[in-house]
Amino acid sequence: AQTVTQSQPEMSVQEAETVTLSCTYDTSESDYYLFWYKQPPSRQMILVIRQEAYKQQNATENRFSVNFQKAAKSFSLKISDSQLGDAAMYFCAYTGRDDKIIFGKGTRLHILP
Amino acid sequence: KAGVTQTPRYLIKTRGQQVTLSCSPISGHRSVSWYQQTPGQGLQFLFEYFSETQRNKGNFPGRFSGRQFSNSRSEMNVSTLELGDSALYLCASSLVLTKGETQYFGPGTRLLVL
């Protein structure tokens, strides 16, 4: 069965600095998608970035980028120029052949002013 | 466009009761998924509906059920509530049923079982 592991339950970063959140996954499939979702306190979860497994180029969305290492089954999220509004719970997620989305346990990110 | 809405936002029930939660997807979205979020288990997939048919189901007991109506609105029902059912229940909608399609989440219904 597929699994998604986020080894950092909590992280802190100084405002304007760069932070990297880690995610590893386990799968025997070759065609899948990976996601990072953000859940701000008491607010709705939103998609931050999506990566298709067959695309070698790392996805980028403004200050958010990923480091996708398919062979290592690693999918880390880099947030550049951290802002107070980036404080949230971040979930790494996987979807494969059966279309079920599997989430990691999440990383709570604190932004220090 | 209005986002995904869920009602009620908060609910308190006692063990043994049943509960029905409602989800209205973004206009035009035909796929609705449900998730349970707890501090211990994290986010777990419950089920997914598309065109009034359940297309996928997670590993939850039969006490958890759902349905989707012709207007894409969805309900989930939990019968014979247990203390462990206390959770945030999230609904998400997407335009179509395609792997990798962006899901848009609602604010959730927080259920407390006493």
Image (spheres, grey):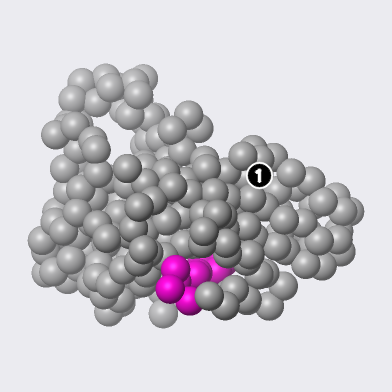
State which region is magenta: A47-55
Q: Nearer the viewer, residue A99 or A44?
A: A99
Kindly indicate the quadrant of the structure image that contains residue A3. top left
Task: Name the residue located 82 percent from the left edge and 67 percent from the top edge.
Answer: A81
Q: Is residue A92 left or right of residue B93?
A: right
Q: Nearer the viewer, residue A10 or A32?
A: A32
Coordinates of residue B76 in the picture (x, y in percent) = 22, 47
Q: Which residue is mark 1?
A: A108
Kindly indicate the quadrant of the structure image that contains residue A101. bottom left
Mark 1 element type? strand
Task: Name the residue located 52 percent from the left edge and 59 percent from the top edge.
Answer: A71
Coordinates of residue A104 in the picture (x, y in percent) = 49, 45
Residue B6 visible to the viewer:
no
* Residue neighbourhood size for the residue with mark 1, other residues' Cα within 10 Å, grouped as few (<14), some (14–19), many (≥20): some
Q: Is residue A94 magenta?
A: no
**Is A71 situated above or below B86?**
below
* On-image quarter of the N terminus of chain A: top left
Indicate the amino acid at tag 1. Arg
The secondary structure that dominates the magenta segment is: strand
Coordinates of residue B26 in the picture (x, y in percent) = 34, 72
**Is B78 situated above or below A28?**
above
Task: Name the residue located 70 percent from the left edge and 48 percent from the top edge.
Answer: A109
Task: Name the residue located 33 percent from the left edge and 29 percent from the top edge.
Answer: B85
Q: Is residue A20 left or right of residue B45?
A: right
Q: Nearer the viewer, residue A21 or A13?
A: A21
